[in-house]
Image (spheres, coloured by chain):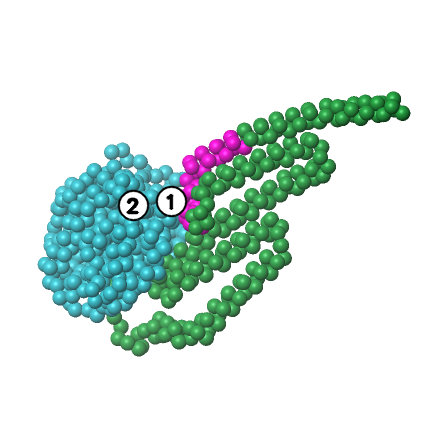
Chain colours: A cyan, B green
């Protein structure tokens, strides 16, 4: 594959940042840390990253790039202050090369797309062989995460490494109930975390994604992480999964479910438009090379207001009837309305949920109403599915939980022909 | 006496013949104009129909909620309606132009008025259609935002947004047409003011308890009841 480096005049990188990068020169490893007002946690994260690089990659030329969205706190100072000299490894090991930490602020407000764009452009300019992105608020990060993320790129000829975490059984409900099963059914690969906050990729994939992604379009600005994973899946890049450790339950809990839905489901629906030939020809799914346990769940009991979820679902179905009428088929809408009639008898079956998700995807393709409105209209229905998931798995063990998720994934895969029929308008 | 009668009759006949001779070419011109006008109007209709089909105007109209309105009134699709309108406007324009050739007194003035009115008619239709489109989009956006924010009476919020935008666009359309400008403006101001006052009273008096409960739930959540664990969707 030919490598096309960005020329300074077409780069999104600022002149000062370019100057700093040129002082660094070529590197082997680049670690990207996108931040925005993360002063409370970013110090711990950068220390863990540096310790990991020192311990596991002492001979590699490495750089930590912080792409900041305009923090008002000391985030950038904390990253800049990081220096290899103040680190002492218990084994007495010292780095053979200088570890550079550079912080830059991209313009135009906080956007995950701009942060990743900056990191990728820097990786391309420095000709980094491998790159990893680490979330600034991953308080449980350990130095070994660096080894876990980067080793498969160096030793196993894979181009993308996605994480696996130990999570609470009620954490990541949207991922478990929609994103993972949908991506798996569409692209035929079992990527457990298709919207990762920590991941690593090769320079080849970075350059490919950098050149192909529509960075300047609306669709290219949000959900860039999931977009990179979907690109790798669509083009059959070798992918591996690595178990990293615990992921705190409230880290990354977005206060806005609509935003989470836009970033993930909106991006998946949008990718279906671009990659029709890739996903339409695949059936079934295959596991990925995985290191560590694929599913490790925390079963600690927690307080969840299921009644409120139910109320928001039932009210959403009733109030959004005119909107849902233009998205769903009459039969599916009637079934949802029947299901939403009584809380005691309510059960959002896998079949109904899959049919609903596929009809939403087809309506997004046919643009029956504004696409953003279609994605927003899915939010109350997802709350209904989350209610059923919480009710069914209140006392479930890890194995029972996994069996339920696997059954949902199978339903998504079996009903995929329905999506194709809806997509082509034959149903 | 008889000779004078014959002469007058001959003179009158010659005048009639002369007038008819003068009128016939104009009639012919009018007929040609009407015929050519029909052909041009028909061509315009066909071209416009193709353009609207290519640009999926019916879909746009469906999004705007115009199709539903037309269906309720048992009218044809918006593409069909617009093409028919263009056909008739074009042909009537040619008919009037043809009639003005006949030299009928006052006709020129009417024709001038008609052609002067056309741009305003199209501007009013344009304002009304895009008003419907905006009303449909923003009412749906308000409804979705209200439902997802768990606000009470979400549909009422959507309907209110829709009504205000439609009333506003109708007022603008009428103003463009020059029809009862002041009446429409005053009516709009009264409706809008009454709506806002009604809402203020409804929220201030009728919804006092509801508003208090909502604000308490929103801001005093942690103080009044045990806080639930947050669930991360991602």
> Which quarter of the figure is the N terminus of chain B placed in?
top right
Depth check, front residue: A354 or B74: B74
Q: Disc 1 marks which residue?
A: A217
Using the rendered image of the protein, determine whether residue A62 is visible from the camera's viewpoint.
no
Left or right: A350 with respect to A227?
Answer: left
Q: Is residue B48 magenta?
A: yes
Residue at position x 38%, y 63% in the image: B154
Q: Is residue B44 magenta?
A: yes
Q: Residue furthest bottom?
A: B224
Q: Disc 2 marks which residue?
A: A362
- The secondary element bearing badge 1 is classed as loop
> Which quarter of the figure is the C terminus of chain B placed in?
bottom left
Left or right: B31 with respect to A316?
Answer: right
Mark 1 is surrounded, within 10 Å at the Cα level, by few (under 14), some (14 to 19) or many (20 or more) other residues, namely few
Q: Chain of mark 1?
A: A
Residue A243: % across, % down: 15, 54
Q: Main secondary structure of the magenta part?
A: helix
Residue at position x 58%, y 28% in the image: B35
| Nearest-to-viewer mark from 2 and 1 | 2
Q: Is residue B135 above or below residue A302?
A: above
Query: What segment is highlighted magenta in the picture?
Result: B41-69
Residue B170: % across, % down: 54, 53
Q: Is residue A47 above or below residue B4?
A: below
Depth check, front residue: B4 or B214: B4
């Amino acid at each position: 594959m030919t490598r096309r480096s960005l020329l300074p005049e077409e780069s999104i990188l600022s002149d000062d940042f370019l100057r700093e990068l040129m002082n660094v020169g070529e590197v082997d490893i680049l670690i990207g840390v996108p931040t925005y007002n993360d002063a409370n946690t970013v110090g711990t994260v950068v220390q863990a990253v540096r310790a990991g690089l020192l311990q596991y990659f002492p001979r590699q030329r490495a750089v930590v790039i912080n792409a900041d969205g305009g923090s008002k706190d000391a985030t950038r100072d904390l990253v800049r202050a990081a220096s290899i000299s103040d680190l002492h490894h218990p084994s007495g090991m010292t780095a053979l090369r200088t570890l550079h930490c550079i912080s830059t602020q991209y313009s135009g407000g906080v956007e995950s797309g701009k942060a990743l764009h900056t990191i990728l452009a820097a990786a391309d300019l420095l000709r980094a062989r491998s790159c990893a992105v680490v979330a600034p608020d991953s308080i449980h990060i350990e130095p070994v995460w660096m080894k876990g993320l980067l080793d498969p790129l160096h030793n196993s000829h894979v181009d993308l490494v996605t994480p696996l975490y130990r999570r609470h059984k009620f954490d990541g409900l949207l991922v478990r109930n929609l994103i993972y099963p949908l991506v798996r059914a569409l692209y035929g690969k079992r990527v457990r975390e298709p919207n990762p906050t920590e991941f690593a990729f090769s320079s080849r994939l970075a350059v490919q994604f950098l050149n192909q992604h529509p960075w300047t379009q609306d669709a290219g600005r949000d959900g860039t992480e999931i977009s990179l994973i979907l690109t790798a899946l669509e083009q059959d890049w070798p992918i591996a999964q690595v178990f990293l450790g615990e992921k705190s339950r409230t880290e990354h809990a977005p206060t806005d479910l609509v935003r989470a839905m836009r970033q993930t489901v909106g991006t998946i629906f949008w990718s279906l438009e671009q990659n029709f030939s890739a996903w339409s020809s695949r059936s079934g799914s295959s596991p990925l090379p995985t290191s560590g346990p694929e599913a490790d769940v925390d079963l600690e009991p927690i307080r969840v207001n299921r009644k409120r979820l139910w109320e928001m679902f039932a009210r959403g179905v009733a109030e959004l009837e005119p909107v849902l009428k233009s998205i769903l088929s009459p039969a599916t809408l009637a079934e949802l309305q029947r299901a939403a009639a009584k809380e005691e008898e309510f059960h959002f079956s896998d079949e109904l949920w899959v049919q609903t998700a596929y009809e939403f995807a087809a309506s997004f393709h046919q643009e029956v109403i504004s696409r953003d409105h279609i994605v927003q209209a899915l939010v109350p229905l997802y709350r209904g599915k989350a209610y059923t998931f919480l009710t069914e798995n209140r006392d479930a063990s890890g194995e029972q939980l996994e069996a339920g998720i696997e059954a949902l994934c199978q339903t998504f895969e079996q009903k995929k022909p329905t999506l194709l029929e809806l997509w082509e308008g034959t149903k | 006496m008889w000779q004078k009668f014959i002469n007058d009759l001959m003179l009158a006949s010659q005048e009639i013949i002369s007038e008819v001779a003068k009128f016939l070419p104009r009639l012919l011109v009018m007929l040609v104009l009407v015929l050519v006008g029909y052909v041009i109007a028909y061509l315009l209709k066909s071209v416009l129909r193709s353009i609207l089909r290519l640009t999926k105007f019916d879909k746009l109209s469906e999004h705007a909620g115009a199709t539903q309105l037309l269906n309720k009134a048992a009218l044809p699709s918006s593409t069909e309606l617009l093409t028919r309108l263009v056909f008739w406007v074009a042909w009537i324009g040619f008919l009037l132009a043809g009639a003005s050739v006949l030299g009928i007194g006052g006709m020129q003035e009417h024709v001038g008025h008609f052609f002067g009115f056309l741009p305003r008619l199209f501007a009013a239709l344009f304002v009304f259609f895009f008003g419907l489109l905006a009303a449909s989009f923003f009412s749906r956006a308000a409804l979705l935002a209200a439902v997802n924010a768990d606000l009470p009476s979400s549909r009422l919020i959507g309907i209110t947004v829709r009504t205000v935008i439609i009333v506003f666009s109708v007022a603008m359309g009428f103003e463009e047409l020059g029809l009862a400008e002041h009446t429409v403006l005053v009516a709009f101001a009264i409706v809008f003011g009454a709506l806002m006052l009604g809402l203020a009273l409804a929220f201030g008096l009728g919804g006092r308890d509801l508003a208090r409960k909502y604000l308490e739930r929103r801001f005093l959540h942690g103080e009044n009841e045990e806080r639930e664990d947050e669930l991360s969707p991602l």
